[in-house]
Image (tube, rainbow, N blue to C red):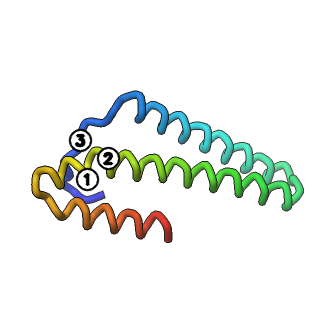
Amino acid sequence: MAENKIYHHHDEEHIKAILNRMNRAIGHFEAVRKMVADGADCSDVLIQLAAVKAAVNSVGRELLREHLSHCVADALENGDRTALEEFCAAIDKFIK
């Protein structure tokens, strides 16, 4: 993360929902870790790992939406075009 970032206020309910999604993904990932430790079938582990990956991508999409609708929109309204460039860079890294 870059230094001197300005943080914007976000809707608390939306952030709470994102954090809940993250916690579920973390719990699911821990369950997959246990499957590996317990010697579960590789195919089953891969299927569950795909579900974790989908959950993480879902969290990322929500964060991108939140960032666009609040941070980027506010910055553009205030004439800050660098926020849009940073948003595009974040999208590029996310979908890599």
Residue at the spot 71% in from the left edge and 55% down from the top edge: 49
Residue 75 is situated, as x and y percent measured from the top left of the image, at: 18, 52
Q: Amino acid at mark 3?
A: His
Answer whether residue 4 is visible to the viewer in this image. Answer: no
The earlier-in-sequence mark between 3 and 2 is: 3
Q: Secondary structure at mark 1?
A: helix
Q: Secondary structure at mark 2?
A: helix
Pick whichever, 91 or 37, lies toward us: 91
Which circle, 3 or 2, is nearer the viewer? 2
Q: Amino acid at mark 2?
A: Ser
Q: Secondary structure at mark 3?
A: loop
Residue 17 is situated, as x and y percent measured from the top left of the image, at: 49, 33
Residue 32 is situated, as x and y percent measured from the top left of the image, at: 74, 49
Res 72 label: 1
The earlier-in-sequence mark between 1 and 3 is: 3
Res 20 label: none
Seen in the picture, residue 15 relative to 66 is either above or below; the reply is: above
Tell me if label 2 and label 1 are in contact, CB under 8 Å: yes
**In this rendering, would 27 be left or right of 77?**
right
Quarter of the picture holding the N terminus? bottom left
Q: Amino acid at mark 1?
A: Val
Q: Residues within 10 Å of mark 2 (few under 14, many from 20)?
A: few
Q: CA distance from mark 1 to mark 3?
A: 10 Å
Residue at the spot 37% in from the left edge and 63% down from the top edge: 90
Res 8 label: 3
Name, please, the residue furthest toward the left.
79
Res 69 label: 2
Residue at the spot 46% in from the left edge and 63% down from the top edge: 94
Name, please, the residue furthest toward the top.
13
**In this rendering, would 45 be left or right of 62?**
right
Q: CA distance from mark 3 to mark 2?
A: 11 Å
